[in-house]
Image (spheres, rainbow, N blue to C red):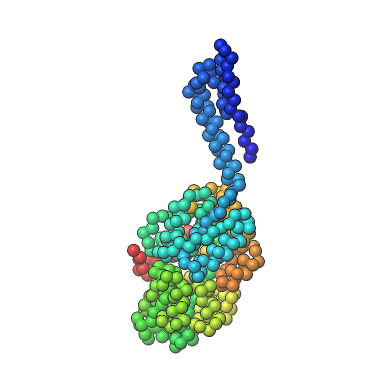
Amino acid sequence: MTAVVRTAKAVLPERGKTAKVHDVSGFIWGDTMRPSRRHILLGATGSVILSSVARSAWAQIYPSRPITMIVPFAPGGTADPVGRLFAERMRNSLGQPVIVENVTGANGSIGTARVAKAAGDGYTIGIGFWNTHVANAALYKLQYDVVSDFVPIALVATYPLVVVAKKTIPANNLNELIAWLKANPGKAAQGSPGAGSQGHLIGAYFQKMTGTSFQHVPYRGSVPAMQDLIAEHIDLMIDTPAVVLPHIRAGNIKAFAVTRARRLDGAPGLPTVDEAGLPELHASNWSAFFAPKGTPKSIIAPLNAAVVEALSDQTVRQKIIDFGFDIPSRDEQSPEALEAFQKAEIAKWTPIIQGVGIKIE
């Protein structure tokens, strides 16, 4: 869009004649050399129009500088590699660097708050998860609303959890694990990425469904928890495929079940909870991009297009599959689909979380 602006020109009066000055709005000032109130208002209107044109032209060249992507968890777990994978690929579509910033703490709520409080100009976006945009609303007194303070961009992956244990545990399937836990009430320890994490919540749900009891040990992320599981300082974990599959393949830990009805493409020999006799334990995490409240559709559109283009890239797709994740269908990649999906997840999980009685101050 091109704006045509007249250049202000002052005509100096000859002796005894009236001076006429044309302002940028094209109005002529009178012989007093002072504009009337009407002319001031008309001139101001012209300035507003020009300002709107300038803002519109600016929006059309978005982005014109680097974009910050907030990852609300520490490097090395599930969140960080997904964020970095998309940040690297999205820069090709957007023509600007996408800089990953890890902002950790409070089950992702600190980093997510940073996104919620950012300007809605497209230069700060966040990667959100089941924890940050579903569970935290039922666990914490947040300073933001997980729905109304964000604008959905796109869902990028979904993934179940995997029930795993130290390799010396005397159980070879899920039923035997449950029997062992019942025979040793309160003695086993489950590690998780932190208090209120999905591993923590699904562990509590697991205990309620099976009549077992074990201790919960929160860590600052999945990596240190997995290190302690391999070292046999704790007994079990319920975590994402990206965290557990390398160690299952290496023989460092035992795996018992995937928390959904379909087996993992990356580990087809691993049974589902349905096959293992506990079909109630369906639980999946997910990753999606969100922008701050107030971000206009004209900015959401290129961000969504960049995510969709990344999801069509075979290298990106293969890495997502290698993580043990599922790629959403094309229909599930729109902002509207993500909005509906998030609201359905909140409706499903809020009563379950409240039912296990976990509340974090």
- Residue in the image at 53% along x and 34% along y: 48
Residue 348 in sight in this render: no
**Residue 95 image position (x, y, % from top left):** 62, 54
Task: Give the camera-side residue of 50 and 164.
Answer: 50
Residue drawn 51% across the image and 30% down it: 44
- Give how far across and how far down residue 246 sits, in percent: 54, 78
Provide residue 102's location: percent of width, then percent of height: 48, 62
- How many numbered marks, from 0 up? 0
Q: Which residue lies furthest to the top in this view?
A: 16
Question: The N terminus appears in which quarter of the rendering?
Answer: top right
Residue that protrudes farthest toward the front in the picture = 15
Q: Quadrant of residue 237?
A: bottom left
User: Quick check: 21 above or below 276?
Assistant: above
In depth, the one of 176 and 321 nearer the eye is 321
The structure residue drawn at horizontal position 54% and vertical position 77%, both measured from the top left corner, is: 245
| Residue 172 in sight here | yes
Give the side of residue 256 with respect to residue 317, left or right.
left
Examine the image and state in which quarter residue 200 appears: bottom left
In this rendering, the answer to whether 177 lies above or below 313 is below
- The residue closer to the viewer here, 112 or 344, is 112
Residue 298, compared with residue 141, is above or below; it is: above
Quadrant where the C terminus sits is bottom left
Name the residue at 53% across, 27% down: 42
Q: Where is residue 187 in the image (x, y as percent from the top left)?
A: 36, 82
The residue sitting at the right extreme is 314
Residue sitting nearer the eye, 343 or 135: 135
